[in-house]
């Protein structure tokens, strides 16, 4: 009672005191049943919390590598026909290269254009000078003057020859009256004959340059065709079984008939 009085004096109410008395008189706590929660060690509690945190974390998205375009998705470039490219190059140098996708075909095409422009230019100048020297000869050389020169040329083989050339070969006629001394008396003066020869020489030079331009165009065709074949074979193209390539060479010592040719034969 003294303790109760002491607690009451400390400010505790009577109901609280009653509750404390009941707890003091209650029996000892019974052991926990197997279904009750078992206490775990601090280490196990930390591991469990770690597992819960890991399971609740958001998964890291996988890294997507860029997919390269496969060769199967791209269409293969169409195979160019070597025979078609060759014949195109023979028709127009450089056209076969352009068809095969080779840029240097423009260079061959430019050379071809330059060659034919040069030919037309020099051929036109040559023909102008040709007309000029023919008119000049007709004004300053006369057949009758040649007859009257004292050589008794009428009826001779020289007379028959120059008359034949005048009717059938004007180029040879104009060359002989200015070049062969037999016909010089037919000129009205030596000075005019010299002027005539100068005009004719300029005409021949222009026409010769025109022929050189044509030869250059021919060489350009051969070189471009050979270069095209070499380039396409180097990149895997080849002639089919029905196509054959043949070189023709025609040579004679000291002859103007020397020639070289490149022939592509295709069996149909």
Image (cartoon, helix red, strand yellow):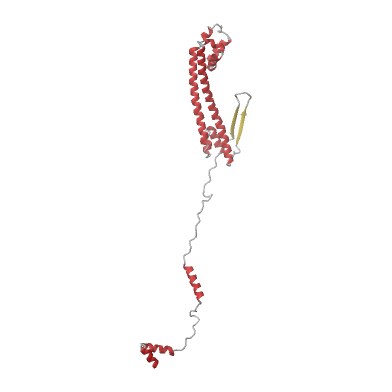
Figure check: 170 above or below 213: above
Picture quarter containing residue 24?
bottom left
Figure check: 148 above or below 198: above
Figure check: 159 above or below 43: above
The quarter of the picture where the C terminus appears is: top right
Residue 219: x percent and y percent?
Answer: 56, 30
Instruction: Give the residue displayed 50% in from the left and 24% down from the top.
Output: 123
> Please, which residue is most extreme toward the right here?
253
Figure check: 31 above or below 240: below
Residue 150: x percent and y percent?
Answer: 55, 6
Residue 262: x percent and y percent?
Answer: 59, 32
- Judged left or right of residue 102, residue 252 is right
**Total label count?**
0
Instruction: Give the residue displayed 54% in from the left and 23% down from the top.
Output: 208
Residue 96: x percent and y percent?
Answer: 53, 36
For the residue pair 268 and 251, the one nearer the viewer reads as 251
The quarter of the picture where the N terminus appears is: bottom left
For the residue pair 202 and 102, the one nearer the viewer reads as 202
> Please, which residue is most extreme toward the bottom here?
1
For the residue pair 229 and 6, the one nearer the viewer reads as 6
């Amino acid at each position: 009672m003294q303790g109760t009085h002491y607690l009451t004096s400390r400010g505790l109410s009577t109901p609280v005191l009653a509750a404390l008395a009941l707890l003091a008189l209650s029996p000892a706590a019974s052991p926990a049943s197997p279904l009750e929660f078992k206490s775990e060690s601090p280490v196990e509690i930390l591991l469990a919390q770690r597992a819960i945190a890991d399971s609740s974390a958001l998964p890291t998205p996988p890294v997507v590598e860029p997919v390269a375009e496969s060769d199967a998705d791209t269409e293969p470039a169409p195979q160019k026909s070597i025979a078609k490219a060759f014949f195109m190059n023979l028709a127009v140098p450089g056209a076969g290269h352009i068809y095969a996708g080779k840029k240097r075909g423009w260079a061959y095409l430019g050379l071809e254009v330059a060659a034919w422009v040069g030919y037309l230019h020099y051929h036109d100048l040559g023909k102008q000078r040709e007309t000029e020297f023919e008119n000049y000869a007709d004004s300053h050389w006369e057949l009758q003057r040649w007859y009257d020169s004292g050589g008794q040329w009428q009826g001779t083989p020289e007379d028959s020859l120059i008359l034949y050339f005048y009717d059938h070969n004007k180029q040879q006629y104009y060359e002989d009256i200015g070049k062969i001394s037999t016909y010089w008396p037919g000129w009205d003066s030596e000075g005019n004959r010299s002027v005539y020869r100068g005009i004719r020489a300029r005409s021949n030079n222009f026409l010769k340059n025109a022929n050189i331009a044509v030869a250059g165009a021919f060489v350009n065709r051969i070189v471009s065709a050979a270069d095209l074949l070499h380039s396409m074979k180097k990149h895997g193209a080849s002639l089919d079984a029905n196509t054959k390539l043949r070189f023709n060479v025609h040579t004679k010592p000291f002859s103007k008939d020397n020639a070289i040719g490149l022939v592509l034969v295709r069996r149909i």
